[in-house]
Image (tube, rainbow, N blue to C red):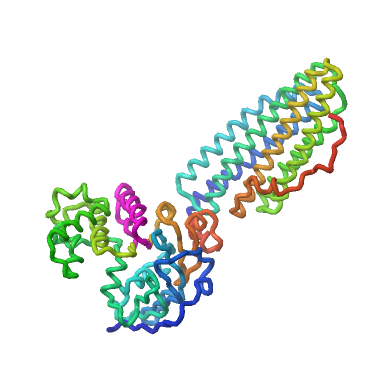
Amino acid sequence: MPFTSNRTPAVPTPASAATPAAPATASPALTIRNLTVSFGTNKVLKGVSLDIAARAVTAIIGPSGCGKSTFLRALNRLHELVPEARMEGDIRLFGEDIYGAAVEPVVVRRRVGMVFQKSNPFPTMSIADNVTVGLRLNGLRNRTLLAERTEQSLRMAALWDEVKDRLNAPAISLSGGQQQRLCIARALAVKPEVLLMDEPASALDPLATAKIEDLILELKRDFTIVIVTHNMQQAARISDLTAFFYLGELIEYNTTTKIFTNPAKKQTEDYVTGRFG
Amino acid sequence: MSAHFEHSLDDLKQKLLTLASKAAAAVNNAIKALLDRDDDLARKVKEDDAELDELEMEVDDMGIGLLSKAPLASDLRLITVAMKFAQNLERIGDEATTIARRSLELSQEPQLKPYVDIPRMAHLALDMLNDTLDAFVGRDPAKARAVVPRDKQVDAINKQLHRELASFMIEKPTTITRCLNLMVISKALERIADHASNLAEEVVYLYEGEDVRHKLKKAAPSPAGETPPPAA
């Protein structure tokens, strides 16, 4: 495998040792310690440590190139698909090392789902088949169970009422906002514990964005959500915690209210008020 | 943040300072009208109050406009604080109008006695207001924190004056109208100090991000040892 994992799997160091004032998290879903990711000679993330609270929305903000998406992709081992990527550090999902030698990347990605910026349904598949593709790839063949899971996932993604009468229609017949919710339903169908979202509403109009945001607020009751966004107001509306990244480092991590009303670091203040640079 | 937004924030601050200076002038003039028995000046204070009302609404309009651009962090705090500032300053203007209206009534009769406590209260309240504005302009939350507990001194004089005027009314019922007018003026000055204290708390929030309302006052020692001289 081209991916090189030269990690430090020793006992995780406390978040406070490497990060600025991380908010106390009782039992984090994800524990990230000293995460460094490089692409060739370019070090994109530099020793990031933070805890992701379970059943909460954590927003990752920062200017372009600060390492937000790189951070997100490290959380479900997507960097392994990039030949020159190299990772150091320790990432634990409810205490379990997701890069452990015995842990299959496929299993990690089932437990940690991902929704991308651009909706990417399988164009030739029907709406229903898009939802259950993950389940079928995992060997589930029972039609009743698949139908149940389709409805359940589409309901959770707040899409059921809009598509229940045309489940066999091609996915690309849906609007952009519906396609994005379909992708969320697809991610939810395999019952992940964590949902990663990389700017999930950046290509949508305000109405479709509002639906996605409402959906995220509903989903956090059952899932841990990490969202990368360039939209400060969106982060303020939907997240409980916010982490500000700059030049590959975690500058500040705190409750969203604190970050957006009274950040502790000048760099954060300058970024959220648009005075950066 | 766009340069246009930055300009709008500067305009907002400028408008607030105009409102603040007019509110302070209104209090000054109202007390001067009382002490000098100057009816023209008292009437001017009443007439000028409309300007303060107008400025308060302008600050609110600017604030709403700026909030619609979804500001965050210190920008968000500045705009919300500005709107509260405007409301408190407008009310200070209302209290000045009350003082002016009562001085017009008082000037119809002989002066009850030399005024000592009322100018003292006015001085304390205006000092609180001026120090708060200095703290706002000079980005000095420590100075604003020090203003908040000073409100208690004005409260104490107000209470003392009310007791004294009550005994005057019992002894000489012919003074009741004048005493009531002086009580209203004393209460107006006490309210002005309250508003100055509120403004100081907002300055602390603006620069430190900490909401100190109802905290600094409670923490301050009561000026019980200080007994103001019994003279209105």
Whether residue A277 appears in this view of the structure is no
Q: Is residue A94 above or below residue B95?
A: below
Decide if residue A62 is on the left or right side of residue B181. left
Whether residue B171 appears in this view of the structure is yes
Q: Nearer the viewer, residue B149 or B73?
A: B149
Please provide percent x and percent y for residue B38: 79, 23
Instruction: Look at 14% across and 48% down and name the residue there.
Output: A165
Instruction: Look at 60% across and 45% down and name the residue there.
Output: B13
Question: Which quadrant is home to the C terminus of chain B?
Answer: top right
Please provide percent x and percent y for residue A72: 36, 68
Q: Is residue A4 above or below residue B116?
A: below
Decide if residue A235 is on the left or right side of residue A160. right
Classify residue A151 by image quadrant. bottom left
User: Is A221 colored magenta in this rendering?
Assistant: yes
Q: Is residue B126 above or below residue B211?
A: above
Please provide percent x and percent y for residue B9: 55, 47
Report the label total. 0
Q: Nearer the viewer, residue A187 or A138?
A: A138
Q: Nearer the viewer, residue A190 or A244?
A: A190
Q: Is residue B34 above or below residue B224?
A: above
Classify residue A57 by image quadrant. bottom left
| Stretch of the chain drawn in magenta | A198-226
User: Is B219 colored magenta in this rendering?
Assistant: no
Please provide percent x and percent y for residue B165: 82, 25
Classify residue B110 by image quadrant. top right
